[in-house]
Image (cartoon, rainbow, N blue to C red):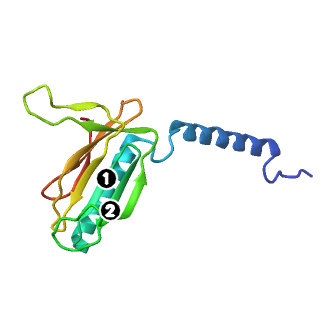
Amino acid sequence: MTRSQRGFTLIELMVVVAIIAILSGLLIGVNSRTYGASAQSVSDQVAQLANLGKMRAVSTRRWHRMEITNTVARLYQCSTTGMAVCTATNWQMVNGLTLSGGTKVWDEKPTVYGTATSGINALNSGIDAVIDFSPDGSTTGGTIFITDNAGAHRFRVVIYKATGAAYVRSGW
């Protein structure tokens, strides 16, 4: 009387586990960066913070200010409501994010079209960009330039004056 085999042998199970381990190791090794370390994701986070500032300014009827340095981006609100411009002592922090160590924030030269002075400065470690959002939805506007440490991936966050909307654009 022959007996039929049921189940799997230990060797077959070990081969399957080894194949799964090799494939998962390859998939994890493809993207070695952690979330937030790329210039694109940092640009997306800065644009989201700017859009939050615009939305809060309109809904709360308070001035909001976004301040960006090489290491942090912070959103402040004025303690008073209305269209009167906020004084230096009336700002309260609302939200903030720490910019990844794998990215750099660049400074912009004043743009004079048709001359050699337009373009991007070298890296400015002391950058302190300030963008104000008014209760009517407009802003002071501006452009924030962000790259990875190698400078290979370039993104800019454009904040429009009239609408206050922030968008991420690739390249400079």
Q: Quadrant of residue 26?
A: top right
Amino acid type at mark 1: Glu
In this picture, is 98 found above or below 39? below
User: Picture coordinates of residue 49 (x, y %)?
Assistant: 33, 57
Q: Nearer the viewer, residue 44 or 21?
A: 44
Q: Is residue 159 toward the left or the right of residue 8 in the image?
A: left
In this picture, is 19 found above or below 68? above
* Disc 2: which residue: 76
Q: In this view, which residue lies farthest toward the left?
A: 114
* Disc 1: which residue: 67
Q: Are circles 1 and 2 on residues that touch, CB within 8 Å? A: yes
Q: Nearer the viewer, residue 41 or 122?
A: 122
Q: Quadrant of residue 132?
A: bottom left
Which residue is pictured at 41% across the width and 39% down the height? 103
Badge 1 density bin: few <14, some 14–19, many ≥20, Cα 10 Å: some
Mark 2 lies on a secondary structure that is strand
In the rendering, which numbered label is found on residue 32?
none
Q: Nearer the viewer, residue 19 or 63?
A: 63
Q: Nearer the viewer, residue 13 or 166?
A: 166
User: Picture coordinates of residue 162 (x, y %)?
Assistant: 12, 57
